[in-house]
Image (cartoon, rainbow, N blue to C red):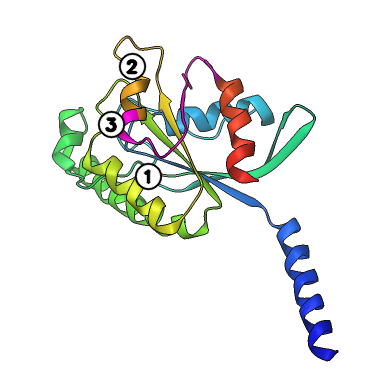
């Protein structure tokens, strides 16, 4: 009898804490795929404020950024989550690339150091994620070592994933290429910049978090 009671209490508290837990939804992907643009769009739509700065120079986001308790609504349903925008994942970060973008050497080296730390932090944070949105630039080749590494890390952790083919407003965008690269995942084509197809995107968030 004591054993049964113990199991019931254990189940009760486990379910209690599960209900109170905040869903952590991570934005991952290579640099300049549009993660922060999408994060800003989500926050603007549901909180009325943006999340972070964007830039044409790679690795503008070099630290983990979090917006807590974002609640989205769809078909009489609500989903509340903490949105985690991560630095762009890269296998190599060279300060000379920033010099080519017009930065001075000292600033370029600092940016490269911060970006490297950001990549390490982003990988560490994967263990805390309940679900992940992988944001890829649909106008670029999805078959890259970085993308394969990101997907591999997610599969190893068995984390629910929604794959975003961003920048469908560009002529070179090819969602079918993204789908064929990673057929094991749902792929949604959007334009985070212009808000194209975000209704479908929000609908899929319910599927990967519940």
State the residue in front, 157 or 68: 157
Name the mark on residue 173.
Answer: 2
- Range shown magenta: 180-197
Of the image marks 1 and 3, the number of the one nearer the N terminus:
1
Residue drawn at (40%, 40%) of the image: 184
Nearer the N terminus, badge 2 or badge 3? 3
- Does any portion of residue 69 appear in the rendered image? no
Against 200, residue 29 (above or below) is: below
Outermost residue, bottom side: 2
Rendered view: 47 above or below 65? above
178 and 85: which is toward the camera:
178
The answer to whether 95 appears left or right of 61 in the picture is: left
Rendered location of residue 69, percent (x, y): 68, 44
Crowding near the residue tagged with mark 3, few <14, some 14–19, many ≥20 C-alpha atoms within 10 Å: many
Q: Residues within 10 Å of mark 2 (few under 14, many from 20)?
A: some
Give the residue displayed 47% in from the left and 27% down from the top.
37
Between 74 and 126, the one lying in front of the other is: 74
Q: CA distance from mark 1 to mark 3?
A: 22 Å
Q: Percent x, y for residue 83?
A: 57, 43
Which circle marks residue 62 in the picture? 1
Tell me if residue 140 comes above or below residue 11 in the rendering: above
Which residue bears the numbered disc 3? 142
Of mark 2 and mark 1, the one earlier in the sequence is 1
In front of the other: label 1 or label 3?
A: 3
């Amino acid at each position: 009898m004591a054993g049964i009671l113990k199991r019931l209490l254990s189940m009760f508290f486990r379910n209690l804490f599960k209900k109170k837990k905040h869903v952590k939804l991570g934005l991952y992907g290579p640099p300049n795929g549009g993660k922060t643009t999408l994060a800003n769009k989500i926050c603007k739509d549901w909180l009325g404020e943006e999340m972070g700065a964007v830039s044409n120079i790679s690795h503008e986001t070099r630290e983990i950024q979090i917006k807590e308790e974002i609640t989205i609504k769809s078909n009489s349903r609500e989903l509340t989550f903490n949105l985690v925008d991560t630095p762009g994942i890269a296998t190599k970060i060279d300060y000379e690339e920033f010099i080519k973008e017009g930065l001075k050497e000292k600033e370029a080296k600092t940016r490269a150091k911060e970006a490297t730390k950001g990549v390490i932090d982003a990988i560490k944070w994967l263990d805390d994620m309940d679900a992940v949105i992988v944001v890829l630039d649909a106008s670029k080749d999805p078959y890259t070592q970085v993308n394969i590494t990101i997907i591999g890390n997610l599969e190893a952790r068995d984390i629910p994933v929604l794959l975003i083919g961003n920048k469908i407003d560009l002529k070179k965008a090819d969602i079918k290429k993204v789908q064929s690269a990673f057929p094991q995942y749902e792929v949604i084509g959007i334009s985070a910049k212009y808000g194209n197809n975000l209704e479908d995107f929000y609908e899929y968030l319910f599927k990967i978090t519940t």
